[in-house]
Amino acid sequence: MISIHDYLRYGKPMLLPEVGETGQLKLKQAKVLVIGAGGLGCPVLQYLATSGVGVIGMVDFDKVELHNLHRQILYTEEQIGLPKVHCAKAALENLNPNTEFIAFEEKLTEENAEQLLSGFDVIVDGCDNFATRYSVNDSCVRLGKSLVSGSILGFNGQMGVFNHNGSKNLRDLFPKPPNPEDVPNCSLNGVLGTLPGIIGTMMAQETLKLIMGLPTLHNEFILFSTLEWQFTKLKF
């Protein structure tokens, strides 16, 4: 049920005819798991929390490092060396004490993926490696979970919605992961700090729309260059 507090806090989005009380109630009842509490995970977690998603889980085994802070804006220098998920949980509870946050300080693997994902309605993947990305995708397929997935490098971002309302999954677009040594990464090639904020916010937008039953990407994949503002939507 929508409370007086909900009306006061979420009144602006509830004014949208596409959202209303029904949509806000769907957000309040939703359970979302975010894989990765790093560059993409931070904005995703912040916007899901402030939008009123009822239960938010987060999976990450990393600790806060100094080089994270230009883009992972949930953290501070005082938290260097501390587990990201616990720092994120504390920050998010300050943003919205009415949301339940669950921290999983562990690495997602093929062995534990289904156990971690099973208690949530929607999965959001902002991890930084292909092994985890494919484990998440395959587990979502087996469990019938909708998946919002994104990635970044340099000035470029990608995003897709998989396994939702009969749509295709990651392997339909990219059947096999590339060799790790052939894939550039942010650690070696860099990333501008604002990029994960842009792509992460887009991922949060798709997640909120998905929960509320609004139109989302369907067998489409977004390629977004923020250097020249080139936006490409691929159908697959």
Image (tube, rainbow, N blue to C red):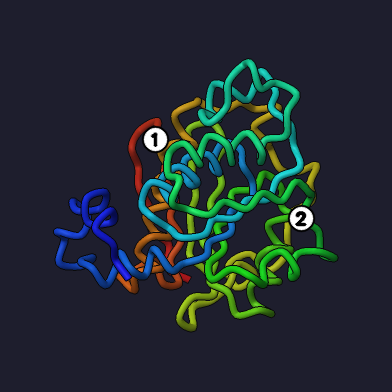
Residue 156 shows in this picture: no
Mark 2 closeness class: few <14, some 14–19, many ≥20 residues within 10 Å: many
Question: Which amino acid, by three-letter code, is at mark 1?
Answer: Thr
| Picture quadrant of residue 34 | bottom right
**Residue on which disc 1 sits:** 226
- Measure the alpha-carbon separation of dots 2 and 1: 30 Å
Question: Which amino acid, by three-letter code, is at mark 2?
Answer: Leu
| Mark 1 element type | loop
Residue 137 shows in this picture: yes
Hey, which residue is sitting farthest bottom in the picture?
166
Mark 1 closeness class: few <14, some 14–19, many ≥20 residues within 10 Å: some
**Residue on which disc 2 sits:** 108
Left or right: where 232 falls relative to 112? left
Earlier along the polypeptide chain: callout 2 or callout 1?
2
As rendered, which of 89 and 118 lies closer to the eye?
A: 89
Left or right: where 142 falls relative to 207? right
Q: How many marks?
A: 2
The residue at 75%/69% (across/down) is 115
Residue 18 percent across, percent down from the top left: 20, 67
In the displayed structure, 145 sits above or below 184; it is below
